[in-house]
Image (tube, grey):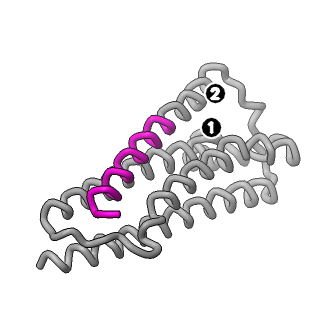
Amino acid sequence: MTQLEIGGRFIRSGFWMLLFGMVMSFGMVLHYVANISPPIGPEFTKTIYLWYACPWTLSTAVVLGGALGMIAIGAVYATLARMASAIPIVGPEKSAVSICTISLIAMFLTGYAGYFVVNSIWPDFYYSVVTDGKNLWLLLQLACMVAYTIGVFLAFNGIRRISYSTA
């Protein structure tokens, strides 16, 4: 695999994830339009700026931001491919695209679909004081963000290695 090939994979996957994140945002809009939130208590109103009244805000923002990050990483790889001699992409760096893509899909599954699973165990956990439910749900999303960061770190090391060869 070359820099141009991995750059293209990052860009293509990033654009698919961007489209996926935009589709996810429809759920947030419908949540507001349909006003499907249960009655909220005083504890929720204290943290309204954190939660934005919709449980899918965090996962949607991470998927959209992660998609833009993948596009940027791909653009850097493609630029370096034009500047440097062909340096093969080897080792764990080859898996960076897959790790980033899978972690963003997992972010959807834990943040969006996982909300309903956790909500079936702890009803209205998001809108009331159910710290066990919130902690589980947020830790699952944090694990996805950590996985995405590992993918970005692998790409960062590869980009750094290639950029030193151009100097």
Q: What residue appears at the point 32 percent right and 56 percent down from the top-left corner?
A: 5
Q: Is residue 128 above or below residue 74?
A: above
Q: Quadrant of the N terminus?
A: bottom left
Where residue 137 appears, as percent x and y from the top left, is 72, 54
* Direction right: furthest residue: 121
The residue drawn where x is 48% and y is 65% is 95
Instruction: Give coordinates of residue 13: x percent, y percent.
Output: 43, 47
Query: Pointer 2: what residue?
Result: 31
| Quarter of the figure with residue 85 | bottom left
Residue 163 visible: yes
Q: Is residue 8 magenta?
A: yes
Q: Which residues are magenta?
A: 1-21
Depth check, front residue: 135 or 153: 153
Residue 94 is left or right of residue 148, and the answer is: left
Whether residue 13 appears in magenta in the rendering, the answer is: yes
Contact (CB < 8 A) between labels 1 and 2?
Answer: yes
Q: Residue at x 70, y 45 (%)?
A: 44
In what element is the residue under mark 1? loop
Residue at x-position 60% and y-position 20% = 33
Out of 37 and 46, give the one closest to the viewer.
Answer: 37
According to the picture, the residue beneath numbered tag 1 turns out to be 54
Compute the Cα span from label 1 to label 2: 7 Å
Please provide percent x and percent y for residue 102: 56, 54
Q: Pick the residue in front: 84 or 19.
A: 84
Q: Is residue 70 left or right of residue 139?
A: left
Image height of 148 relative to 11, above or below: below
